[in-house]
Amino acid sequence: MELNILESETHQNSRRRKKSTVWEHFTVKTDGPGCARAYCKRCQKSFAYLKDSKQSGTSHLKRHITLGICQKNKKIPCSKTGADPPKKRARAKPYIAAISFDQERCNSKMAKMIILHDYPLHIVEHQGFIDFVRALQPQFNPLSLNAIQGDCVAMYLREKQNLLNLIDGIPGRVNLTLDLWTSNQTSAYVFLRGHFIDGDWNLHHPILNVFTVPFPDSDGSLNQAIVKCLSNWHLKGRLFTLALDKFFSTETLMGNLRSLLSVNNPVILNGQFLSQNCYARVLSRLALDALSAMRETINKVRESVKYVKSSKSNEANFLKLRQQLQVPSTMDLVIDDQNKWDTIYHMLVAACKLKEVFVCFDAFDPDFRMTLTMDEWKHVETLCRYLNYVYDAANILTVQPYPTANVFFLEVSKLQVVLTCAALSQDPFCRRLIMPLQKNFDQYWRESCVILAAAVAMDPRYKMKFVESTFAKIFGENAEYWTRFVEEGLNELFLEYNIIQVLPFTATNDNEGNETMIKTESFEEGAFDASLFTGDDGLSDIEFYISDLTCNQQYKSELDEYLEEPLETRVQEFDVLSWWRINGLKYPTLSRLASDILCMPVSTLSADAVFDTEIRKMDNYRSSLDSLTLEALICTKDWFQYKSLPISVSNALVKVEC
C-alpha cells in the first residue's frame, strides 16, 4: 500500500513537472522506499529528486543539460523552440588608429618631464634613455643638451607671460616672501614668492624669481635684485607686505626694504607690514632649542631604538617582550632623520609609549646596554608634551600649504599661553626647559600678534570678539591697550583703502628699474613727492577726506557694519575666501582689504621645508646651471605643481638661445 502511494505521488509529481523542458531529458524512477531519483536519458547518470516526501527541485538537472556536463549531450537545446544556447561572442581585438609621429610634441613632453621630476638636462644624451625612447618610437630623433635646455626655457617664458597676465588683472595687491638657500660656493640663492588673490577669490602663491646674491650680501645686491624683479612683474606700488627671515636680514637691508614699501605704498601704514619673522623657522628654533637642552638623553633614546631596529631578531624579541608585558601601545619604533625635527619628535613619542619594554629589555636581551632611568624617561615625556604643541602649530603649514592668514592667530596665541604657563610651572625641570623657549617666543608674539589679530578679525566666525578674549587671557590688565591698537590699525587701513578708491595711487609699469633702485643709505622722510595730494591752501585731499568723515557723526563704515554683524556659525569646513566672494557686493571696500590681509604670508618656507633643521642647500648640479635655466626649471615646476595656472603644453615651443 505504501509503495503504491509513493508510486502514485511520484507519478503525480512527474506529471506535474512535465511543464518544464528539463523533463524532456530526464525520467523519474523509484529507488527504494520513499525515495526516487531522476535519470538522464542519454548518459543514465542519476540525480536526487525525492526523499521522504521532500523534492530536490530541478535546478541541478538544468545545469547538467545547459552547462554541457552531460558527456553525450553537449549541444542539447535548452528551450522549447529547440534553439541552441547562445554562443559566447569572441572578444574583439582593440582597434588602434594610426598616429603620425610628432617630434615637436615629443620634445615638449620631454621638457615637461624633466621640469616636473627634476631630471638632469643631460639625460637626453644618455645612451640608455635614447635606446628606451627609440624602442617606443624608432622615428624619434634624440635631442642635444642645448636643444632640451632651450625647450625648457621656452616653456618657462610662455608660462611666465600667462602668470604676468594673471597678476596684471588682480584687483588687489601682492604679498612677497624671501627665502634663502645656501650652496657650496660663495653665493646664496633667493626665492622670491608672490601671494595674491585673483578676481574669483582663488589664492595663488607662485615662485616669481630665483636669483643668486653674494653671501653674505655686502654690496646691496639683494636690494637691486628685488627692485628688478618688482619691475619685471609690474609690482611697483602694488606691494602689501614683505616677509623674510632673520637669518639673512640686516639692519641696512631691513631699512632699505622698509623704504621700498613706504615709497611704493605711501598710504599703507608707511610700510609697517615688513616682517622678518618666518613662522615655520620660529617654531623650528623652539623645537631645536628644546631638543638641544636634552641632547644626551635623546642620544640614549636614539641608540636604544637603533639597537632594536638593527636586526629582525632584535625586533622579534622586543615585540615578544611587549606582548608579555601587555603594553597597550601599537606604535612602531622609528629611527629619526636629524635633518627633520618632526621625525625626532615622532621617534621620542613612540619610544615613550614603549618605555616599559625598554626598561626590561636588558634582562631579556643581555646585549642591550642603553637603558634610561625612570627620571630620564619622565623628562622625555615632558619634552614630548610641549613639543606636541609646537608640532601642531607647525603642521598646519603641511596640511594646507600656504593657508590663509586667519588660521594663525589661534595657533600662535594657544602656544603663547601654553609656554607662559609652563615657564611658571612648579616642576623645576619643566620650568628650566621651557623658560628660554617662552622668552624667545614671547618676542615673536609681541612683534606679530597685531597683524595676526587683524587677519583673524577678517574671519566672520571670530572678528574682534576672539581677539578681545585672547588678549584678556594673555595681556591681562593691558588687554584693552592691545585690542585698541588692533582696532585703530584696522580703521586706519580701511580709511586708506577708501582713500585709494577716491585718489588711486597709480604705479607705472615701466622697465627702468634703475630709476627706482633702493639706495643703501637709510630712507629719508619725504623721499617721495606728495604734491599730488596737497591743495593750494596747504591742506591735503586726504585731510579733507578725513575731516569730512569726522564731521559726519552719522557715518558708519563698512568695517563698523561688518564688526557689528553677528558672528558666523563655526563649522569645520568653512571657506573664508568663499564667504568674502559672496559678500563682496555688501562690503566692496572692506573685501579688497580682506583679500590683501588674508593672502598675507606668515611663513617663507614651502610645505616640504617646514620641519627642516638647517637652511636648505642648492646641490652642485643646479649650482652649475646658468641663472636663466635654473630659474626656468624651479619656477615652472612650482607653477605646474601647485596649479596656479592651467598646465598646457602646446606642440610648438618658441626656441630660445641658451
Image (tube, grey):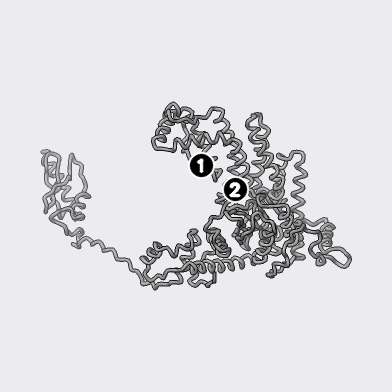
Question: Which residue matches tag 1?
Answer: 336
Asked if marks 1 and 2 touch (Cβ < 8 Å), the reply is no
The residue positioned 70% from the left and 50% from the top of the image is 451
Residue at point 42%, 28% (across, down):
364
Left or right: 123, with 38 as reference point: right
For the residue pair 543 and 528, the one nearer the viewer reads as 528
Residue 190 figure quarter: bottom right
The image quadrant that residue 499 belongs to is: bottom right
Which x, y percent locates residue 106?
Answer: 44, 68
Q: Nearer the viewer, residue 403 or 344?
A: 344
Q: Residues within 10 Å of mark 1 (few under 14, many from 20)?
A: some
Q: Nearer the viewer, mark 1 or mark 2?
A: 1
Spot occupied by residue 587 in the image (x, y as percentages of width and height): 70, 58
Position in image of residue 323 (x %, y %): 42, 31
The residue sitting at 75% across, 50% down in the picture is 487
In the rendered image of this protein, does residue 589 appear above or below residue 44? Answer: below
Residue located 79% across and 63% down the image: 528
Disc 1 element: loop
* Amino acid type indicated by mark 1: Asp
Q: Nearer the viewer, residue 471 or 570?
A: 471
Q: Which residue is mark 2?
A: 571
Answer few, some or many: residues within 10 Å of disc 2's Cα (few below 14, many 20 plus, some between 14 and 19).
few
Q: Which quadrant is the C terminus positioned in? A: bottom right
SS of the residue under disc 2 = loop
Q: Is residue 357 placed above or below 340 in the rendered structure?
A: above
